[in-house]
Image (tube, helix red, strand yellow):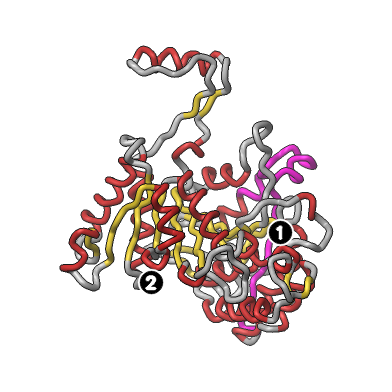
Amino acid sequence: MGTAITVDAKGKFIVPDDPIIPCIAGDGIGPDIWNAGKPVLDCAVAKAYGGRRRIEWLPVRAGEDCWKETGEFVPEATKEAITKYRVAIKGPLSTPVGKGFRSVNVMLRQMYDLYACVRPVSHIPGVPSPVIHPDDVNMVIFRENTEDLYAGVEWDHDTPEAERVIALIKELGKNVRPHSAIGIKPISEFGSKRLVRMAIQYAIDHKLPNVTLVHKGNIMKFTEGAFRQHGYDVAKEEFAAQTVVEAEAASAPGKLVIKDRIADAMFQEALIRPEQYSVLATPNLNGDYISDALAAQVGGLGLAPGVNMSEKLAFFEATHGTAPSLAGKDRANPGSLILSGALMLEHIGWKEAATRIYKAVNTAIARRAVTEDLAAQMTDARTVGCTEFGEIITKLL
């Protein structure tokens, strides 16, 4: 039947040997990659712990397909399961562009206050890359998940609401072109500090050398500029003994260096000096851009894991889209979901199982039997389907 993960008085997860973990297959290629990835996770756990541990999967529903059948994007049973069991995993969920409902992914993040999107990015040997030295990329991005333009405070052009906001802005001495759509960009001290706090603690726990605040504070001085300042403040107020600012780093060897970069400059740094960066802390929109760009440097989103989380709940996910043109055709790459599953196993303390998955994925790619997205970039690869790729990884665990 399985047992729920609980939390002790200090906020630490207490994980039983048979945790119940809700899973959402997702839309589009979601069922394809879940059916290929789930056996990998189960086998890794079984082999790592000799059958002593196992995951009790609890299938729940969300997304566009769910809405078409039930009239709800996130049914109450799904909400209750995620709240109760604290750790969940999902495939991609559909997000219409320019019309229809807001992103279900954003909805879930805000519903559970999953304020940090954490994306580790590193190169797997053998994966094609557009850069010369992809192995120099080894970063973890902490993206604020609940504020910024993604907070969804916006109004369409020529609506009464947009006209009222434009009129108010004019009263306050600023000008906005008539007939404009309006979006509001909230960035708070509370939201910024808790995101940077998590990034700094992660860097300390993993003995990493630096945390970089990525912002556009030279232009948006009171939003992104504030994010930068709040980041430095939390480092000084709460981690003074362990951190040092970049200008003083030479005089404090061994301390975690806190630095910042303008967002557009950071894209250049990621290309020409990636080895100088280990953890990035960013507002929402910057993090969306930079995490996808870094994933492209190491081979693309098909092998990019991620998690949306708070101290109380973690929702692991495939970081790519639903690719509806590939749905049901056994052509998708399940790697992102599989590696997100490994990240989930690490999160609950089952590192031995996670390590088996990382090694098996590396070996599978080195043998060059890969899904079509990777094979298209290789000269001597054998193209396999989604299911077979999962089976190859499973045999290598």
- Mark closer to the observer (1, 2): 2
Left or right: residue 300 compared with residue 200: right
Tag 2: amino acid: His
Q: CA distance from mark 1 to mark 2?
A: 33 Å
Q: Position of residue 152 (x, y in %)?
A: 52, 34
Tag 1: amino acid: Pro
The front one of 13 and 194 is 194
The front one of 299 and 273 is 273
The image shows residue 126, relative to residue 145, as above or below, that is below
Q: In the rendered image, which residue does mark 1 sit on?
A: 59
The image shows residue 352, relative to residue 147, as above or below, that is below
Helix, strand or loop at label 1? It is strand
- Residue 384 appears in which quarter of the rendering? bottom right
The front one of 61 and 147 is 147
Left or right: residue 35 compared with residue 220: right
The front one of 217 and 10 is 217
**Residue at 71% over, 53% down:** 26
Q: In the rendered image, which residue does mark 2 sit on?
A: 206
- The range drawn in magenta is 51-79
Q: Residue furthest left?
A: 251
Q: Position of residue 134 (x, y in %)?
A: 52, 68
Q: Residue furthest bottom?
A: 50
Helix, strand or loop at label 2? It is loop
Q: Position of residue 228 (x, y in %)?
A: 31, 46
